[in-house]
Image: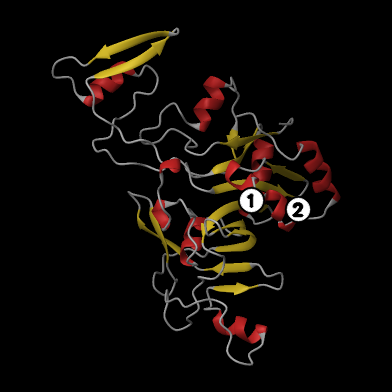
Amino acid sequence: EDENVLAVDKPASVPMHPCGSYHFNTLSALLRYELGRSENLKQVHRLDRLTSGLVLFAKNQKMARQLSEAIGAGKASKLYLARVIGQFPQRAPTNKKQFGEREEFGQKHKGESDAAASARMNDDTWRILFSNDLEVDIALSCLNHKDGVYACTPISQNSSAKPSKTRFRLLHYNKDDDTSILACEPKTGRTHQIRLHLQYLGHPIANDPCYGGQLNKQNQFPPYTRTNKISLSQNNQPETIIRTPGESDDALAIRCCRRCRFHVPEEDVPHAKFIWLHALRYSGPGWSYSTPLPDWASSSSTLWWHKLPPIEPTAENNKRARHAGGGCVFM
């Protein structure tokens, strides 16, 4: 935190603002009611509920405008970490003629040079750069606004699709669980952009059930179970509230929960509480903020930390990065 900016390391599962069944347990409400930040903080950007990591709040209108303009105009660099299925980028699509068809990546023809093989295997939606980074350039479209479903769709197939571009770098491959840790640099800011581009490459985030990953016991909320009793604790004294005759689930929840007034789901459907995607660093002209590594990436960090894309080498950025301490965290 400094005189103009509040940097927060948002936990996964916490939405940015009240929405759906989340009324109190949101980042904006926690800042205001739990941490006493009652000033008019201005949200500069947002993260998905399932994504953890850096969120910036401006303390005044001037800084909000500067940060928003830098991010919106592409003058700010954004760095995320993701843990994906498979050895990246072995599953990348390689067929130029038919969208979506895949073959094994890296199979060179006899006598073919590396450059020729790369040009042949790229399918015009992604390319390998001189630094061995892989850049995806394919548009995204919304398939269902109500449910928030998006997909990679070439503009030639959907004129309303929006251009999007992300650069990926392999940091570490773990043979034990067949997952890769990647550095992800979105060059545009589309909804679910990193998740969709990784799914398109055949390497979805390993525990992202919405886009090709697997939901497991570690990243899901336990299913809701109907009951006639709810045990509460108030002033360290246990209390049991009994459902009154004919009382609905909604009425019982509203009566028991004094803060949230949440809506109880009708079905016992497990939901993901986090995915392996973390906003690690945002930097721009004269400023840089970052967070510590998430738990799922820290154990192997000594093997790949030096591979992270560097901050733009300007004196202003270096000064501000030291001032920020490499990580602003209070949650």
Between disc 2 and disc 1, the foreground one is: 2
Tell me, yes or no, if residue 46 can be seen here.
no
Q: How far apart are marks 2 and 1 (CA)?
A: 15 Å
Q: Position of residue 143 (x, y in %)?
A: 35, 59
Q: Mark 2 points at which residue?
A: 311
Residue at left 64%, top 92%?
A: 111
In the picture, which quadrant includes the N terminus?
A: top right
Instruction: State whether residue 170 is above or below residue 243.
Output: below
Name the amino acid, label 1. Answer: Ile
In the picture, which quadrant includes the C terminus?
A: top right
Q: Which of 193 and 296 is in front in this view?
A: 296
Instruction: State whether residue 199 is above or below residue 228.
Output: below
Number of numbered discs visible in the structure rendering: 2
Q: Where is residue 237 in the image (x, y as percent from the top left)?
A: 41, 7
- The numbered dot on residue 71 is 1
Residue at left 36%, top 33%?
A: 21
Residue at left 52%, top 32%?
A: 27
Q: In this view, does 74 lie to the left or right of 206?
A: right
Which quadrant holds residue 248? top left
Which element carries disc 1, helix, strand or loop?
helix
Instruction: State whether residue 15 is above or below residue 201.
Output: above
Q: In this view, does 246 lie to the left or right of 50?
A: left
Tell me, yes or no, if residue 138 can be seen here.
yes
Q: Position of residue 106 (x, y in %)?
A: 57, 78
Q: Residues within 10 Å of mark 2 (few under 14, many from 20)?
A: some
Q: Which of 16 and 53 is in front in this view?
A: 53
Q: In this view, does 168 lie to the left or right of 158?
A: right
Name the amino acid, label 2. Answer: Ile
Which element carries disc 2, helix, strand or loop?
loop
